[in-house]
Amino acid sequence: MSKSISRYMINTWEPESPSFWQNTGKSTAARNLWISIPALLLAFAVWMVWSVVVVNLPNIGFTYSNNQLFWLTALPGLSGATLRIFYSFMVPIFGGRRWTAISTGSLLIPAIGIGLAVQDVNTGYPTMLILALLCGFGGGNFASSMANISFFYPKASKGFALGMNAGLGNLGVSVVQFVVPLVITFAVFGAWGGDSLTWVKNGVSKDMWLQNAGFIWVPFIALSTLLAWFGMNDLASAKASFSEQAVIFKRKHNWLMCWLYTGTFGSFIGYSAAFPLLIKIQFPDVNPLDYAFLGPLVGALSRVAGGVISDKLGGARVTLWSFLLMIAAVLGVLYFMPQGGVGGSFSGFFWMFMLLFAGTGIGNASTFRMIPVIFLTEHQRAAAGKGKAVQEQAIVDANKEGAAVLGFTSAVAAYGAFFIPKSYGTSIALTGSPDAALWCFIGFYVSCIAITWWCYARKNAAMPC
């Protein structure tokens, strides 16, 4: 075992060196990436599990209003986004392997808690709110996961690596909305999983094991935690204190990218969280769980493709077109929604949302391709002509700052998981429809287009990327 690479700690890591990358780096990075992906998928599944659970709560005896249900859908987004602020800085402090294992293991708390709570219709609403907040553990994991993977890959491959980690990790949203409706129909764990509950709607009743919405993830979380602990690596070059990383708060591009990523990822996660309940309210004759998982699926797969496209065309150009696509899709959603409870076309509504999810996925990848390129370019400009040692240190510093910005922007953007469902709920309460919320989203996307074009995409932009 060489001194540069021990069993868990890697002391020398030079992904920008072609010989190092081909001989050692590429395979090590790939191993860490492929352990990270399922851990992140499970994190997203736990984070978004309430989007499926709330649809079934009224039918098994929980008497919550629509606004209370929207709160249960929105709160994981609020806590997850807040946790991301702290998780953004954890990898350089604790190490990627350690923090991935710890943060993945923490998902057991809400998964088991939900499984126990939904078995008793007398469980208090405050208890449900606490469990919804605890699901934010899953949301927090994204910030540290993306920061960790960004350290392993060279500039030329960051779009691919981050797109794969985030895109396949984002599949957790689609997986939870596809798997949970299946596993709650039978006793997956036999007597160990508890008795069935009685689901009733329009005089029709059936047995349901809603507790499986939480319990089904427990064995996979345990396995993923062990894989992270024993199979991943910590990078010595990624070590940094909070004060070293806090320099990002003085960087203009950190705040600009927070705004843009809120437009892409904030939209993706917010639409994902609210999609099942929005379908149920706008089209009551449609079973939302037959369709809801397809939106996050399209968004996640589009993110994988978006990473590859952004490596070829440049992140800023792809981001600009993504926002234009999202505006067109939201206008389509508004056109096909019922007005005053009448009319509307579910097929048109559904396909416009698929287009919207595709736009968010591509934009998620392109914005995350922009961030490391922006900070590497900035540091390399400052180090130009100052000798090899200074230029090498510039790459190390750029990677640390870029990783911190990836995490922090994901934290800010994750508030979309709270604001979009809550905006729907508020809009419906005040006006009787979600239209006002959607018009506000369009206005936000227009501001994102202006920032992207002026700062990054136009011909003489100060920071083309």
Image (spheres, grey):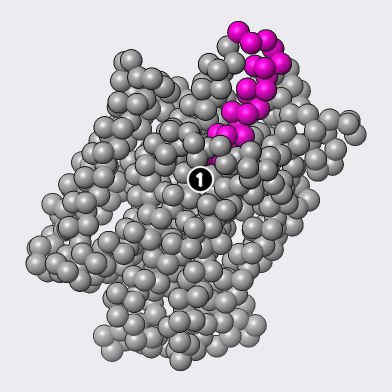
**Whole-percent x, y for residue 137 in the image:** 56, 62
Q: Residue at x 65, y 16 (%)?
A: 391
Q: Nearer the viewer, residue 143 or 173?
A: 143
Magenta-span inclusion, residue 124:
no
Is the magenta region chiefly helix, strand or loop?
Answer: helix
Q: Residue at x 37, y 54 (%)?
A: 416
Q: Secondary structure at mark 1?
A: helix
Image check: 455 left or right of 181? Answer: left
Disc 1 residue type?
Phe
State the quadrant of the N terminus: top right
**Whole-percent x, y for residue 76 in the image:** 46, 65
Q: Residue at x 21, y 64 (%)?
A: 427
Residue at the farthest bottom position: 122
Q: Residues within 10 Å of mark 1 (few under 14, many from 20)?
A: many
State the quadrant of the C terminus: top left
Up/down of 111 relative to 359, above or below? below
Q: How many marks?
A: 1
Q: Residue at x 33, y 15 (%)?
A: 460
Residue 67: image quadrant is: bottom left
**Whole-percent x, y for residue 424 in the image:** 26, 63
Q: Nearer the viewer, residue 246 or 276?
A: 246
Q: Which residue is mark 1?
A: 408
Magenta-span inclusion, residue 390:
yes
Image check: 321 left or right of 211? Answer: left
Up/down of 257 relative to 389, above or below? below
Image check: 340 left or right of 199? Answer: left
Residue 75: image quadrant is: bottom left
Region of the chain picked out in magenta, as a range? 385-406
**Whole-percent x, y for residue 115 in the image:** 55, 78
